[in-house]
Image (cartoon, rainbow, N blue to C red):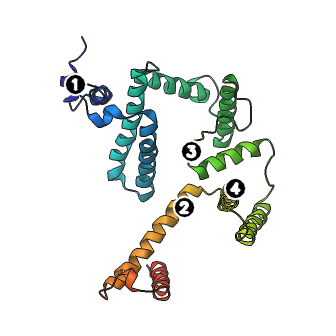
Amino acid sequence: MPRDPDDLIHDPEGGMARLVAIMARLRDPQTGCPWDVEQTFATIAPYTIEEAYEVADAIERGAWGELKGELGDLLFQSVFHARMAEEAGLFSFDEVVRAICDKMVARHPHVFGDESRDKSAAQQTLDWERMKAAERAARAETGVLDGVAPGLPALLRAMKLQNRAARVGFDWPSTGEVLDKLVEEARELVEARDRLTPAEQAEEMGDLLFVMANLARHLRIDPEAALRAANAKFIRRFRFIEAALAGQGRRPEDSDLAEMDALWTAAKRAEKQA
């Protein structure tokens, strides 16, 4: 006999079924939350991306106490989308779970099937890519770049596009050529900035960033993670400047560039000595 939804919602041991029931109640047009009821796939998608980054941030900081909550927030996003899909007659949460389970079993024949596990991680990655390519072909995605999600963060999508092209030989053979191209694109942007329209300047900047992503790929660096680290470093050092000025009863707007640059250098020196 199915459980009463109210009992399930208030049962701390209700597990996944409890979360699904909570989501259904939140979306109920009569008794739910007006904000949740008004949401669509498009309005929720930015929150989904944000929650994924919150998970990555907690992992990067080693904030294991926060990670549980962040993973829960991300899981809730999946349940939210699945609930909206069920309301639209598209699919249910159970179908989402079934699909990912079937995919994982199919893509790991060396674990769940009769293939040998005696492969390197690199060989298993190649096998994974071959299976993904076969799945794309079954969906009539025959182009090399088909299936790279447009909604990915731009740097990540640039790397995925470049990886796809590299598989068919469209790639610079070494990092040196990428660095040469980087210098070329930077020079073009600087030299042409006074005669280009804003749209043309943006295009040149995009070319430069695309090459930066390619350089990161050749160096096997995650550009998103590298930029997040650079952001964190900037925040850390600028707070050093703010603290130093606050000790004198001043704020950054009471200072000037020369003084703040000197404090920035002091922050760098303090980090190296720590």
* Callout 3: SS: loop
Q: Give the image location of residue 37, x and y in percent.
A: 32, 31
Camera-side residue of 91 and 70: 91
Whether 261 is drawn above or below 67: the answer is below
Circle 1 sits on which residue?
8
Can you see residue 67?
Answer: yes
Among the two numbered marks 1 and 3 on one chain, the one whose residue lies closer to the N terminus: 1
Among the two numbered marks 2 and 1 on one chain, the one whose residue lies closer to the N terminus: 1
What residue is drawn where x is 37% and y is 56%? 63
Distance between the alpha carbons at the discs numbered 1 and 3: 36 Å
Q: Which mark is residue 227?
A: 2
**Extreme residue toward the top, this view:** 1
Q: Amino acid at mark 4?
A: Asn
Q: Which mark is residue 214?
A: 4
Distance between the alpha carbons at the discs numbered 4 and 2: 14 Å
* Callout 1: SS: helix
Q: Amino acid at mark 1?
A: Leu
Quarter of the figure with the N terminus: top left
Circle 1 crowding by C-alpha within 10 Å: few under 14, some 14–19, many from 20: some
